[in-house]
C-alpha cells in the first residue's frame, strides 16, 4: 500500500518534471534580432541580421558594440536564417524584429517570395516596418551605428514613425498593409527609402560615435513606388508629400508658399483630411479628391500683414494652391512616368462600383494613366502665432 | 457543563458518608497533591461535618479568605440546625456568592474542582456544593499585536474567556446576545463558548456549529486553531474557513451581521463563522474610514492577493516561454541582467522565494532583539550581494520583494500563509508549462474555492453564487446608509439594519450659511 502511494507520487512528479519545460528558452540564450536586411547576389540572397548585444546596451560604460551584424548567403531565405546558427552561440529570436530593409536590387526584382517567409513563420509578428535601401545595399545600411538611440534598429523604427508624423514625406508600412496592396488589383504599394548620408567616416564602432558629427548617418528620403511587388521608381520629397495628402496620411507638416517675390509664408499643417470620390462620366470612371487642411502660421517673411481681415482669404488660397501643386506633381509622376496606381484609386472604384470594376480591373495600370482626377483643396488658417503682424513691418498711415 | 460519562461507563455518585467521599477524593488525586481538604464541624450541631475542598493553585486567595469569614458567620448562625439538615439551607447562606451550584456525581465534582471552584461536602448529603473562586491571574487587556489599526479601538482579547466575553458584552448591550458554554477535550476540558445574537444569527448555522462542537473527540484543545481544523467543512483545504480575530470590535461587527463567534479559553484568537473568502481581505478599519478610501484600500488588497499568488509565476513563465509579450526594451534589460547568471529562471526564483520564506520564518521565531539583524542580513547580504556576485539577477530580487510586500498587505495571517504556499505551486507550474500551466492552476484554484464551504455557506458568496444586492460589502464598501440589510444566507433575519434617511435635510444643504 505504501509502495503504491510512493509510486503514484513518483509518477506524478515525473510527468511534471521529466516531460516539462518543452519549448522553454531562457532569455540569456537568445540572440534578439532587430533588423533584417535582404540583398541580391549572384547566388541568391545575402541576408544581414542586426542582433542585440544586451550586455553592451544595459551596462552604462562599455567597449562593445550594442549590436552585432551577421551575414549569410544562400538561395533560400529560411535556409540562410538557419545558416546563421553556424556563426552564433545563441538561438536567433525574431519576435522583436523592428525593420526589414530591402536592397534596391531585391525590390526591383520583386519581393513576393520574401514576404511569404515573413508571413508563414510563426515567430515573426506583424508590427515591423519595411523600407528600401536607396542608392546602397541593405547590408551597408545595417552596418551603420547610430548615436543617441544606440540600437540602429530602434533608431530607424522610431525615426520613421516620427518623420511620418511630423514631416509627412514618409510612410510606415507594415506587412499586412504591404501584402494587401500587392494583392489588390486597384492598388500598389509604396515603401519609404532609406539613405546613407555622404559623410566620410563610416561608424562601425562606438568609438567613432564619440565625436559630435561628421560620420555617416541614416536618413529617410521619399517613397519608392511599386508596381505589384516590383519597385519601379522613386518619388521625390514633394511628390511623396503629395502622395500622402491624397491618401489621407498627413498628420502634421510644414509647407511654404510664395505670395510674391518678396513675401514668403510658411504654414504648419495641423490637420489634413482627404476624401476620394468616384464618378462615372460617359461610362468612364473619374476621381475627385477633396482635401481639407487646417494650419497655423509659422513664419512670415517680408511685409505682409497676416492679421488683416482682407488677407485671410489670400492666406488660405495660397496654401490651397501649394498643396494642390504637390498633389498634382505626385499624380503626374505616377500617371505619366511610373504608370502605377499607388493611390488605390482602383480600389475606390472597386468599392463603389464593384460590377463596373470587373471590366476595368484587367490592365488597370494602363487605364490609370489617363484616369481623370480632379483635386480640390480647402485651407483654413487657425492661429497666427504668438505675434500677429511681422515685427519689422512699418505701419501704413 | 456537559456531563461526561467516565471510562467505565458508570457514574459514581456521591455517597451519604462524608468519610467515604473524602477518601475517594484523596485517593484519586494522590496524597501529596495541592488538593486541600478542610473538614470542620458546625458548632453545637452534633456531628454535622462539613468539608471544603479546593485546589490550592487554582483558587483566588482573597476569595478563600472572604469565604472563611462567611463560614465563621455560618458557624454561629447554624447553632440550632439539626444533623442531616438539607443542603438547601446551606445553599441559602451562600446565595450571595458567585456561581454557587450543586452536583451529584464525582465526575462533575472533579470538573468543578479543576475549574477552580471550592467544593463543599456535607455529611449525610448526596450532593455537593460548588462556589466559584478561580483566580484571575493572567494578562490584562492590551493592544493587539497581530492586527494593528490606526483608526479604531486598540483593545484586544486576552487568554481569559471571561474577559473576552466581557469585551463583547460591553459592545453589544442586548439581551439577545446569547453566550453558550460547552467544554471540549477529554483531558483538558477546555471551556468553549458560543456567542451569537438571537434572531439575527441563523438558527441552522448556530445548531450546526453546536452539533459539530459536540462531536469533537480529542484529548485537548489549546487554541482556537484546533477548533478550526477539527470542525471545518473541507478538512483538506488550505484555505481558512473560520475568521480568527484578536479584536473585539471585529467580532462584534461579525455578530451584528449574524455570524457566530467561538471563544476558546486560553487563547486571544476568537473564531467567527461562517467566514467568506472576501472577509479575509477586509479589515475592521475599512468601516471606520471614508467609504471611498476603504473601497480603494480593499481593491488594493485584492490586487495584493493576486500579486502574491502570481508575480513570481508570471515572471518565470514570461521569461522562459513567452518572450514575445515582453516589450523589447524590457526584454533587452532582463536579458542583460541575466547575462552570466548560471541558473534557469525557475531555479533562480525558487531559490529567492525560499530564502525569503526562511527569513520570514526566522524573523518570527527569533527573539525580538535579533529581528533587525535578520532584516539587515536579508536585505543587504542576500539581496545586494547575490546580485553583485552574479548568482541572481536583479529582476528576481524585485519580483520577490513585490511578492513579499503584497503578502504583508493581506491582513489575515492564515490567508496570507495559504497564498504564500500556493505561490510555490504556481511557480512550479509556470516553470514547467508556462502561462498555460499558470492558467490551469488558476482554473483548479477557482474550482476549489467554489467547492469549499464555511459552515454550509459557499466560500465565494456573494460573488459565486451571486446574490443580488449582496455585493455592497465585498471588494467595494458601500456607505453604511446604503448597506441596509445583513448578508443573505448568513443572517437569519431580513430586517433592515440601517435606515436610509439623511439627518441633514435638503434645505440645510442648499443654504450654507453661518449661524
Image (tube, coloured by chain):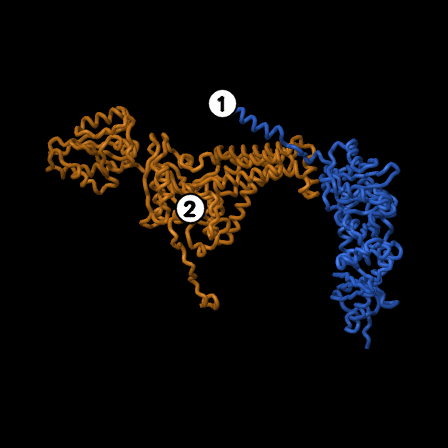
Q: Residues within 10 Å of mark 1 (few under 14, many from 20)?
A: few
What residue is shown with label 1?
Answer: A2
Q: Position of residue A192 (x, y in %)?
A: 81, 50
Q: Position of residue A105 (x, y in %)?
A: 87, 44
State the hue of chain B: orange
Residue A372 shown left or right of residue B433 in the figure:
right
Q: Do the residues bearing badges 2 and 1 touch, measured as CB atoms within 8 Å?
A: no
Q: Chain of mark 2?
A: B
Please identify the quarter of the rendering in which residue B424 is found.
top right
Tell which tag, 2 or 1, sits nearer the viewer.
1
State the separation of the CA atoms marked 2 and 1: 46 Å
Disc count in the image? 2
Label placed on residue B56: none
Q: Chain of mark 1?
A: A
Please tell me which residue lies in front, B407 or B10. Answer: B10
Q: Position of residue B7 (x, y in %)?
A: 29, 27
Please tell me which residue lies in front, A171 or B152. Answer: A171
Q: Quadrant of the N terminus of chain B?
A: top left
What residue is shown with label 2?
Answer: B250
Can residue A365 be seen by looking at this rendering? yes
Residue B66 shown left or right of residue A209 in the figure:
left
Does residue A332 sit above or below B369 in this rendering?
below
Residue B291 shown left or right of residue A381 in the figure:
left
Q: Quadrant of the C terminus of chain B?
A: bottom left
Name the residue rendered at 76%, 55% in the picture.
Answer: A165
Please identify the quarter of the rendering in which residue A72 is found.
top right
State the hue of chain A: blue
Can residue B73 be seen by looking at this rendering? no
Amino acid at each position: 500500500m505504501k509502495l503504491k502511494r510512493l509510486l503514484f507520487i513518483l509518477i506524478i512528479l515525473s510527468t511534471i518534471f521529466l516531460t516539462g519545460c518543452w519549448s522553454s528558452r531562457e532569455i540569456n540564450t537568445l540572440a534578439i534580432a532587430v533588423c533584417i536586411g535582404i540583398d541580391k547576389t549572384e547566388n541568391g540572397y545575402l541576408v544581414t541580421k542586426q542582433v542585440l548585444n544586451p550586455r553592451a546596451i544595459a551596462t552604462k560604460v562599455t567597449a562593445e558594440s550594442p549590436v552585432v551584424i551577421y551575414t549569410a548567403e544562400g538561395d533560400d531565405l529560411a535556409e540562410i536564417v538557419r545558416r546563421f546558427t553556424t556563426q552564433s552561440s545563441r538561438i536567433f529570436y525574431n519576435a522583436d524584429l523592428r525593420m526589414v530593409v530591402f536592397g534596391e536590387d531585391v525590390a526591383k526584382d520583386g519581393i513576393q517570395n520574401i514576404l511569404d517567409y515573413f508571413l508563414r513563420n510563426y515567430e515573426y509578428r506583424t508590427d515591423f516596418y519595411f523600407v528600401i535601401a536607396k542608392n546602397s545595399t541593405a547590408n551597408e545600411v545595417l552596418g551603420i551605428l547610430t548615436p543617441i538611440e544606440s540600437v540602429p534598429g530602434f533608431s530607424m523604427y522610431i525615426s520613421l514613425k516620427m518623420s511620418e508624423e511630423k514631416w509627412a514625406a514618409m510612410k510606415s508600412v507594415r506587412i499586412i498593409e504591404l501584402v494587401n496592396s500587392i494583392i489588390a488589383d486597384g492598388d500598389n504599394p509604396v515603401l519609404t527609402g532609406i539613405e546613407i548620408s555622404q559623410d566620410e567616416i563610416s561608424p562601425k564602432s562606438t568609438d567613432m560615435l564619440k565625436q559630435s558629427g561628421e560620420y555617416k548617418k541614416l536618413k529617410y528620403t521619399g517613397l519608392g513606388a511599386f508596381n505589384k511587388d516590383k519597385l519601379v521608381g522613386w518619388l521625390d520629397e514633394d511628390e511623396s508629400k503629395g502622395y500622402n495628402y491624397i491618401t489621407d496620411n498627413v498628420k502634421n507638416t510644414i509647407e511654404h508658399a510664395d505670395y510674391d517675390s518678396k513675401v514668403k509664408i510658411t504654414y504648419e499643417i495641423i490637420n489634413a483630411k482627404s476624401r476620394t470620390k468616384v464618378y462615372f462620366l460617359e461610362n468612364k470612371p473619374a476621381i475627385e479628391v477633396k482635401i481639407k487642411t487646417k494650419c497655423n502660421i509659422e513664419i512670415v517673411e517680408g511685409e505682409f500683414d497676416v492679421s488683416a481681415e482682407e488677407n485671410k482669404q489670400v492666406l488660405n488660397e495660397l496654401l490651397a494652391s501649394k498643396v494642390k501643386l504637390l498633389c498634382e506633381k505626385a499624380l503626374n509622376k505616377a500617371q505619366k512616368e511610373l504608370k502605377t496606381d499607388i493611390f488605390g484609386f482602383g480600389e475606390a472604384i472597386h468599392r463603389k462600383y464593384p460590377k463596373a470594376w470587373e471590366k476595368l480591373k484587367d490592365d488597370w495600370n494602363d487605364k490609370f494613366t489617363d484616369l481623370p482626377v480632379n483635386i480640390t483643396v480647402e485651407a483654413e488658417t487657425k492661429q497666427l502665432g504668438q505675434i500677429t503682424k511681422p515685427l519689422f513691418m512699418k505701419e501704413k498711415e | 457543563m456537559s456531563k461526561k460519562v467516565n471510562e467505565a461507563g458508570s457514574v459514581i455518585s456521591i455517597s451519604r458518608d462524608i468519610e467515604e467521599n473524602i477518601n475517594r477524593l484523596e485517593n484519586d488525586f494522590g496524597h501529596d497533591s495541592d488538593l486541600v481538604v478542610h473538614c470542620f464541624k458546625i458548632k453545637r450541631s452534633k456531628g454535622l461535618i462539613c468539608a471544603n475542598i479546593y485546589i490550592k493553585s487554582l483558587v483566588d486567595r482573597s476569595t478563600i479568605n472572604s469565604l472563611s469569614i462567611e463560614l465563621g458567620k455560618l458557624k454561629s448562625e447554624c447553632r440550632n440546625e439539626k444533623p442531616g439538615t438539607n443542603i438547601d439551607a446551606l445553599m441559602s447562606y451562600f446565595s450571595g456568592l458567585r456561581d454557587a451550584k450543586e452536583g451529584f456525581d464525582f465526575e462533575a465534582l472533579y470538573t468543578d474542582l479543576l475549574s477552580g471552584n471550592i467544593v463543599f461536602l456535607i455529611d449525610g448529603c448526596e450532593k455537593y456544593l460548588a462556589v466559584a473562586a478561580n483566580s484571575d491571574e493572567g494578562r490584562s487587556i492590551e493592544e493587539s499585536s497581530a492586527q494593528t489599526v490606526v483608526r479604531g479601538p486598540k483593545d484586544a482579547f486576552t487568554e481569559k474567556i471571561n474577559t473576552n466575553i466581557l469585551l463583547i458584552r460591553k459592545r453589544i448591550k442586548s439581551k439577545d446576545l446569547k453566550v453558550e458554554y460547552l467544554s471540549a477535550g477529554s483531558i483538558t476540558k477546555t471551556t468553549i463558548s458560543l456567542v451569537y445574537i438571537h434572531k439575527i444569527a441563523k438558527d441552522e448555522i448556530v445548531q450546526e456549529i453546536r452539533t459539530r462542537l459536540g462531536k469533537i473527540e480529542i484529548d485537548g484543545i489549546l487554541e482556537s486553531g484546533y477548533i478550526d481544523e477539527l470542525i471545518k467543512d473541507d478538512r483538506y483545504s488550505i484555505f481558512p474557513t473560520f475568521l480568527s480575530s484578536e479584536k473585539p470590535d471585529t467580532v462584534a461587527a461579525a455578530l451584528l451581521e449574524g455570524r457566530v463567534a467561538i471563544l476558546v479559553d486560553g487563547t486571544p484568537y476568537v473564531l467567527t463563522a461562517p467566514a467568506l473568502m472576501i472577509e479575509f481581505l477586509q479589515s475592521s478599519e475599512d468601516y471606520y474610514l471614508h467609504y471611498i478610501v476603504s473601497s480603494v484600500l480593499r481593491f488594493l488588497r485584492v490586487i495584493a492577493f493576486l500579486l502574491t499568488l502570481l508575480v513570481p509565476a508570471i515572471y518565470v513563465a514570461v521569461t522562459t516561454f513567452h518572450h514575445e509579450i515582453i516589450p523589447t526594451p524590457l526584454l533587452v534589460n532582463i536579458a542583460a541582467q541575466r547575462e552570466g547568471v548560471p541558473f534557469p529562471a525557475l531555479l533562480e526564483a525558487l531559490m529567492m522565494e525560499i530564502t525569503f520564506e526562511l527569513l520570514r520564518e526566522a524573523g518570527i521565531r527569533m527573539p525580538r532583539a535579533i529581528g533587525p539583524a535578520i532584516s539587515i542580513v536579508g536585505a543587504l547580504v542576500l539581496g545586494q550581494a547575490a546580485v553583485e556576485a552574479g548568482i541572481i539577477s536583479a529582476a528576481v530580487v524585485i519580483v520577490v520583494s513585490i511578492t513579499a510586500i503584497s503578502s504583508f498587505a493581506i491582513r489575515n495571517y492564515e490567508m496570507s500563509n495559504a497564498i504564500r504556499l500556493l505561490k510555490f505551486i504556481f511557480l512550479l507550474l509556470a516553470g514547467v508549462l508556462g502561462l498555460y500551466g499558470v492558467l490551469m492552476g488558476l482554473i483548479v484554484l477557482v474550482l476549489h474555492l467554489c467547492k469549499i464551504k464555511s459552515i454550509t455557506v459557499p466560500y465565494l458568496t456573494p460573488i459565486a453564487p451571486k446574490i443580488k444586492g449582496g455585493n455592497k460589502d465585498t471588494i467595494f464598501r458601500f456607505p453604511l446608509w446604503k448597506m441596509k440589510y445583513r448578508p443573505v444566507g448568513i443572517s437569519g433575519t431580513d430586517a433592515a439594519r440601517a435606515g436610509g434617511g439623511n439627518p441633514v435635510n435638503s434645505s440645510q444643504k442648499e443654504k450654507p450659511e453661518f449661524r
